[in-house]
Image (cartoon, helix red, strand yellow):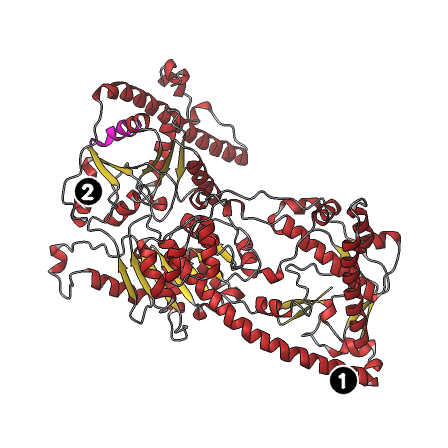
């Protein structure tokens, strides 16, 4: 049985003045098995109800329960130590850990103290099952964090197996892989020397994680950002090339800030717990000496109406999540859990980038016990609310979903003004005019007069200081200002809410792209782009990303390349989120693969060993060109970028070339003209098949709609009204049966 106080749940043995005496028997409530197919009910184990009971009130009842619980726990520990290996432990556990349901089946009636101990055991068993079958995000990558060492308890394997046998309906879920695992996976046999990090004021648990990950030395952006952020507590504006380690440059200071808060809060909570224990001891002594405490009747307990201490529901027992058992040894840890606020917030423009940032933060916070959560669109909002109920210290989110939960007034998001760290990743994209209306609304809340003056703000992007040349016609207007780096940063600081003097770090080259990137181009007609794309994929196999400006173009290319047996993986905003993450995982797993994507995958994604980037359509802005090309040639590796430039792309290409101030013209990509003859034949045939398949799908949709309408009106359809009747005769026979 649980009690509620101030919106928080406590175990029943903490109630010193109230209790339940079981008169009747617990009865099992039948559950519809179809409920387990729904996500909201996947954690339900069983339901039992108790209708015949009465409320008792006495200080001695609480003491008896406490003594029995402690005595039983001591006896269990003693028995486990004395156990001989010959005797199977499973039988002993079954004798001692009989749950409440087994007693009701035999018809026995436990008293108040025994029932409370049994409920205690039942809840602990549920915790064991939760630890054994740790719920993961699946493709949502909602990995559960480790708890602090003080709260960890070793769970014997026989307990886990026993609990699973008793409750076979609990389903286990496999942990999902992610494309970031290859980036973060290193050999654990030989840990790296992290002495180069020590002068940057990195916390000791983070140093341990960096050694485990094999990060022996910081990158330039990390070496410049960490001392100012950690030691000087400054805001940071960082511009560095793609693949230069910007994520850790803000993740490590954020973890340090959370650890500092925990340290200061723990000292305060320890003093409060000491005074609370002395106060409770004084109250217990006073109640023991008063005879009137024994004369409190059941009717007085019912009429007291003390909702703060307990609330009882007649006729049923509520099943509650997040069961917390408070003992004298763990009072300090539980109190700090209850008071744990949201301390760090990371905002990203895309869902995939949010998933990646979460994995990187989890990796470096491995030995800190800090909890993180991810809030993105395309995933179940209710599940993300449950994740927030665990009170993570750091949240990584896209603006849309975060704004929804803020509007719904989720309790954990009620203290956004008291954040210790705010990170805006890919900031130039996030604050563009006309984009992310929710972000501007969030920034209004974060930057009003009540915001935390000690809050640190981190703003990072590879194109943070990239300046477009203002056209002459714009400069001729009144009040027109020529944009430079200083003006752009000042406008960005005003939008984000940086009020002090930040640390500005600009490590970008004049060309904005990395030195190890080879940039090439092909000039062709629009209808010839398919030929050169197919030619490149055949001649240069490897991990290749193909970028297009529209979703329709991605869909058409996906159909063409599928017919040509290239096995492409599409990625665009109209796909389900799980499928988007699944395609990213497949792309990272295969050595030779093609990812067809829009600009949703252009920013920030650290997919390992991408060898080629093809711009099937020239990007509309210079920033997009830099970010697209930055998916390859990461971390000092080499890569190739190829622009397919049609007549309609020339204007955008000239703008990009002028903005990036390229000193030399991009070289032309070499093409073998002999191969192009067979390439064109195959591509033309694939185009005909793709058009036929497209017409077939449109015809099926049209015909199904007509048939449904005719059935609703009780009418008969003529064959002439249906589409696709003349399809077979309009195509050559070899086109329908030919395979490439």
Q: Which of marks 2 and 1 is nearer the N terminus?
A: 1
In magenta, the rendered stretch is 523-534
Task: Locate residue 338 relative to residue 242 in the image: left or right.
Answer: right
Question: Residue 633 appears in which quarter of the rendering?
Answer: top left
- Circle 2 sits in a helix, a strand or a loop, which is it? helix
Q: Name the residue under label 1.
A: 286
Nearest the eye: 552 or 401? 401
Question: Residue 297 appears in which quarter of the rendering?
Answer: bottom right
Q: Mark 2 points at which residue?
A: 653
As measured in the structure, the alpha-carbon distance from the residue carrying label 2 to the one carrying label 1 is 84 Å
Spot occupied by residue 421 in the image (x, y as percentages of width and height): 41, 65
Task: Locate residue 165 relative to residue 646 in the image: left or right.
Answer: right
Q: Residue at x 68, y 70 (%)?
A: 328
Question: Residue 51 appears in which quarter of the rendering?
Answer: bottom right
Q: Is residue 528 magenta?
A: yes
Spot occupied by residue 225 in the image (x, y as percentages of width and height): 33, 61
Residue found at the far right of this picture: 107
Task: Check the image and report above or below for 113 versus 530.
Answer: below
Which disc is residue 711 wearing? none
Task: Check the image and report above or below for 679 versus 80.
Answer: above
Spot occupied by residue 42 in the image (x, y as percentages of width and height): 64, 49
Task: Locate residue 299 relative to residue 674 in the image: left or right.
Answer: right
Tell me which secondary structure the magenta stretch mostly adopts.
helix
Nearest the eye: 407 or 128? 128
Residue found at the far top of this picture: 733
- Circle 1 sits in a helix, a strand or a loop, which is it? helix
Q: Is residue 225 magenta?
A: no
Task: Check the image and report above or below for 678 versus 140.
Answer: above
Quadrant into which the C terminus falls: top left
């Amino acid at each position: 049985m649980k009690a509620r106080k101030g919106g928080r749940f406590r175990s029943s043995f903490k109630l010193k003045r109230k209790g339940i005496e079981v008169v009747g028997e617990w009865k099992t409530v039948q559950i519809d098995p179809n409920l387990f197919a729904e996500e909201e009910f996947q954690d339900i184990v069983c339901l039992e109800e108790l209708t015949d009971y009465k409320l008792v009130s006495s200080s001695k009842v609480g003491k008896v329960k406490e003594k029995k619980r402690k005595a039983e726990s001591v006896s269990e520990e003693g028995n486990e130590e004395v156990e001989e290996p010959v005797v199977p432990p499973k039988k002993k556990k079954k004798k001692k850990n009989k749950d409440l349901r087994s007693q009701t089946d035999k018809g026995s009636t436990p008293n108040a103290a025994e029932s409370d101990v049994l409920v205690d055991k039942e809840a602990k068993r549920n915790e064991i099952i939760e630890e054994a079958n740790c719920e993961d995000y699946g493709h949502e990558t909602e990995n559960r964090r480790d708890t602090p060492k003080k709260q960890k308890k070793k769970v014997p394997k026989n307990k886990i197996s026993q609990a699973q046998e008793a409750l076979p309906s609990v389903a286990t879920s496999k942990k999902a892989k992610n494309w970031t695992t290859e980036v973060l996976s290193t050999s654990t046999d030989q840990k790296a020397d992290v002495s180069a990090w020590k002068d940057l004021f990195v916390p000791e648990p983070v140093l341990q994680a960096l050694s485990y990950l094999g990060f022996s030395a910081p990158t330039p952006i990390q070496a410049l950002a960490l001392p100012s952020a950690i030691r000087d507590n400054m805001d940071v504006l960082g511009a560095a090339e793609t693949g230069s380690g910007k994520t850790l440059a803000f993740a490590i200071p954020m973890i340090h800030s959370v650890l500092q808060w925990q340290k200061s809060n723990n000292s305060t909570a320890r003093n409060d717990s000491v005074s609370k224990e002395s106060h409770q001891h004084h109250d217990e002594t006073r109640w023991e000496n008063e005879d009137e405490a024994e004369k409190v009747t059941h009717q007085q307990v019912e009429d007291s109406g003390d909702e703060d201490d307990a609330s009882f529901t007649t006729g049923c027992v509520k099943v509650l999540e997040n069961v917390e058992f408070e003992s004298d040894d763990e009072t300090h840890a539980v109190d700090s859990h209850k008071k744990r606020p949201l301390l760090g917030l990371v905002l990203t423009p895309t869902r995939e980038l949010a998933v990646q940032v979460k994995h990187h933060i989890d990796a470096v916070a491995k030995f800190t016990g800090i909890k993180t959560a991810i809030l993105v669109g395309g995933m179940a909002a209710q599940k993300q609310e449950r994740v927030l109920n665990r009170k993570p210290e750091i949240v990584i989110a896209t603006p849309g979903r975060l704004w929804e939960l803020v509007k719904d007034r989720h309790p954990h998001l009620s203290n956004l003004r008291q954040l210790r760290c705010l990170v805006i990743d890919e900031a130039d994209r996030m604050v563009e005019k006309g984009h992310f209306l929710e972000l501007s609304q969030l920034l209004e809340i974060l930057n009003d007069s009540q915001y935390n003056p000690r809050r640190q703000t981190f703003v990072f992007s590879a194109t943070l200081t990239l300046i477009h040349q203002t056209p002459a016609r714009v400069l001729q207007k009144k009040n027109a200002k020529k944009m430079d780096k200083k003006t752009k940063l000042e406008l960005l600081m005003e939008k984000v809410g940086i009020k002090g003097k930040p640390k500005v770090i600009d490590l970008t080259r004049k060309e904005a792209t990395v030195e190890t990137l080879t940039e090439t181009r092909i000039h062709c007609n629009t209808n010839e782009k398919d030929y050169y794309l197919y030619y490149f994929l055949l001649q240069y196999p490897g991990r290749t990303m193909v970028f297009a400006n529209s979703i329709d173009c991605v869909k058409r290319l996906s159909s063409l390349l599928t017919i040509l047996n290239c096995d492409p993986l599409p990625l665009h905003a109209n796909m389900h989120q799980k499928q988007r993450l699944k395609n990213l995982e497949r792309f990272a797993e295969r050595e030779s693969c093609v990812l067809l994507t829009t600009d949703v995958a252009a920013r920030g994604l650290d997919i390992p060993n991408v060898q080629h980037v093809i711009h099937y359509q020239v990007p509309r802005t210079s920033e997009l060109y830099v970010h697209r090309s930055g998916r390859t040639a990461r971390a000092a590796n080499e890569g190739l970028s190829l622009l397919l430039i049609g007549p309609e792309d020339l204007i955008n290409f000239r703008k990009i070339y002028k903005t990036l101030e390229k000193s030399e013209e991009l070289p032309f990509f070499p093409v073998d003209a002999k191969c192009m003859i067979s390439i064109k034949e195959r591509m033309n045939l694939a185009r005909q098949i793709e058009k036929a398949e497209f017409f077939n799908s449109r015809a099926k949709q049209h015909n199904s709609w007509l048939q449904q309408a005719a059935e609703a009106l009780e009418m008969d359809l003529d064959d002439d009204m249906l589409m696709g009747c003349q399809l077979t005769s309009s195509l050559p026979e070899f086109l329908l049966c030919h395979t490439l």
